Image (cartoon, rainbow, N blue to C red):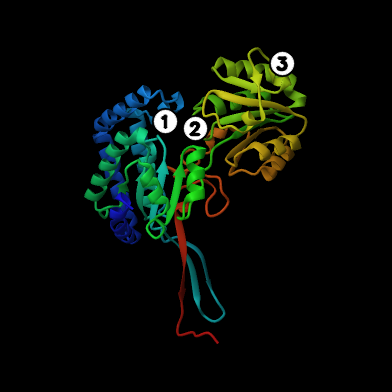
């Protein structure tokens, strides 16, 4: 398995050591890693500048360059993310269930580390730090495979994390990275018995390739075709603010809104304001006949547009005749990530939250809040859109498994 083959044994050894490493020791290592990131920020910025220059030379899309680009503020945010993890409870050892059976056997269900976690991700260097910090705090070793476009940035970050973490007492090889090649990705997908879990983060093509081809268990972190639905009873001032924020605050991320739905009863009043506000921020709007009639320059929305995660200043829109029609549209076209309703009707909110099939459902709030940091979890490993093991932001508890510990006093089964 090439580079991964050489890392396999050390990664398993590191995982065994981390499984019994104290919370205090893990937190001390996270503190050292955060301090090292800040102290060596200039080296990271120089590596990142070379990656950004290469991306511009290759005419990478603006959203890709935005996710790739680092500055001092973003590096400080990475360091602060590690410190936030320090303040969170260590999930390892948490007792989930405990009871004594009539025969005297005492049962405890206890959180334990996963072992070795593999992460395959695209051009966001912050994932390097987030993934390493989360895995280590949850007691697991991590093998990282970033993208070619961020190769220099990721190499600089992994070197800092490995050196500072080991210097603070973590086992050798707790944080490792494989080269960003197709071969290394295939090796990770075939690494059953080496990796205990594989997490893909990136575009739909990457995610679906890993989900369909991996023999290692996978958590699917899906794309974000997120909707904002403006209900008949909505406060239209709130609705306008939420829609604009969900689309333009950072359009190149998975929790940005890609579609909006407006109830027919408020369409005449709301749509002209919404179209004008979005266009003022440079958003290209694609809509049905009523959306197009609400302003100049609105294009025709196709069925494919309603299914697309644009990750850019584009959005599709549609007028619906009822709450149920909005729910049907969301369930037909959404990706199971985040959906939002703006309404002053508690019954409508309850029906929407119950009927919509998504990892997170917002009521009178922007889709941009589906985020580990915003939801008080610290850094996240990704947003899971599947239904088994983990769903929504994957924080520390979602990066553990559990074991049953049974204590007896000589009981035998009859």
Establish if 292 lies above or below 398: above
Q: Position of residue 179 (x, y in %)?
A: 32, 43
C-alpha span from label 3 to label 2: 29 Å
Q: Is residue 377 left or right of residue 235?
A: left
The Cα atoms of the two marked residues, 1 and 2, are separated by 8 Å
Q: Position of residue 122 (x, y in %)?
A: 42, 37
Residue 400 appears in the picture as rendered: yes
Q: Which mark is residue 97?
A: none
Find residue 8 and report its image quarter: bottom left
Residue at the extreme bottom of the image, as rendered = 414
Q: Which residue is mark 2?
A: 253
- Tell me, for residue 293, which label it has, or none: 3
Among numbered discs 3 and 1, the one appearing first in the sequence: 1
Q: Are marks 3 and 2 in contact (CB under 8 Å)?
A: no
Marks 3 and 2, the one that precedes in the sequence: 2
Q: Closest to the observer: 73 or 130?
A: 130
In terms of depth relative to the viewer, which is nearer, 65 or 149?
149
> Which residue is tagged 1?
67
């Amino acid at each position: 398995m090439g580079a991964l083959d050489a890392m396999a044994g050390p990664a398993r050894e590191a995982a065994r050591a981390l499984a019994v490493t104290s919370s205090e020791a893990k937190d001390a290592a996270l503190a050292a890693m955060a301090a090292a990131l800040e102290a060596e920020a200039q080296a990271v910025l120089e590596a990142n500048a070379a990656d950004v220059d290469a991306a511009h030379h290759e005419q990478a899309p603006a959203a890709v360059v935005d996710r790739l680009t680092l500055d001092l503020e973003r590096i400080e945010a990475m360091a602060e993310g590690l410190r936030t993890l320090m303040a969170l409870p260590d999930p390892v050892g948490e007792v989930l269930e405990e009871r004594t059976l009539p025969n005297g056997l005492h049962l405890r269900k206890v959180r334990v580390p996963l072992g070795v976690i593999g992460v395959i991700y695209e051009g966001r260097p912050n994932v390097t730090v987030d993934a390493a910090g989360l895995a280590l705090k949850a007691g697991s070793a991590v093998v990282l495979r970033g993208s070619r476009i961020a190769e220099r940035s990721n190499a600089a970050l992994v070197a800092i994390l490995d050196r500072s973490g080991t210097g603070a007492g973590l086992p050798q090889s707790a944080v490792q990275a494989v080269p960003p090649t197709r071969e290394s990705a295939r090796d990770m997908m075939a690494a059953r018995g080496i990796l205990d879990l594989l997490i893909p983060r990136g575009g739909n093509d990457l995610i679906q390739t890993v989900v369909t081809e991996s023999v290692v268990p996978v958590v699917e972190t899906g794309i974000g075709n997120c909707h904002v639905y403006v209900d008949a009873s909505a406060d239209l001032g709130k609705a306008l603010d939420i829609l604009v924020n969900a689309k333009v605050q950072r359009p190149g991320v998975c929790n940005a809104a890609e579609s909006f739905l407006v109830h027919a009863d408020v369409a005449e009043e709301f749509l002209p304001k919404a179209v004008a506000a979005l266009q003022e921020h440079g958003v290209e709007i694609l809509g049905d006949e009523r959306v197009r009639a609400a302003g100049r320059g609105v294009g025709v929305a196709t069925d494919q547009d309603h299914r697309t995660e644009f990750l850019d200043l584009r959005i599709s829109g549609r007028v619906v005749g009822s709450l149920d029609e909005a729910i049907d549209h969301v369930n037909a076209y959404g990706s199971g990530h985040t959906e939002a309703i703006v309404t002053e009707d508690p019954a409508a909110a309850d029906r929407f939250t119950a009927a919509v099939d998504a990892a997170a459902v917002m009521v009178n709030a922007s889709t941009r809040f589906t985020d580990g940091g915003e939801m008080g979890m610290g850094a996240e490993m990704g947003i899971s859109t599947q239904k088994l093991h983990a769903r929504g932001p994957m924080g520390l508890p979602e990066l553990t498994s559990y074991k049953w510990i049974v204590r007896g006093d000589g009981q035998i089964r009859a």
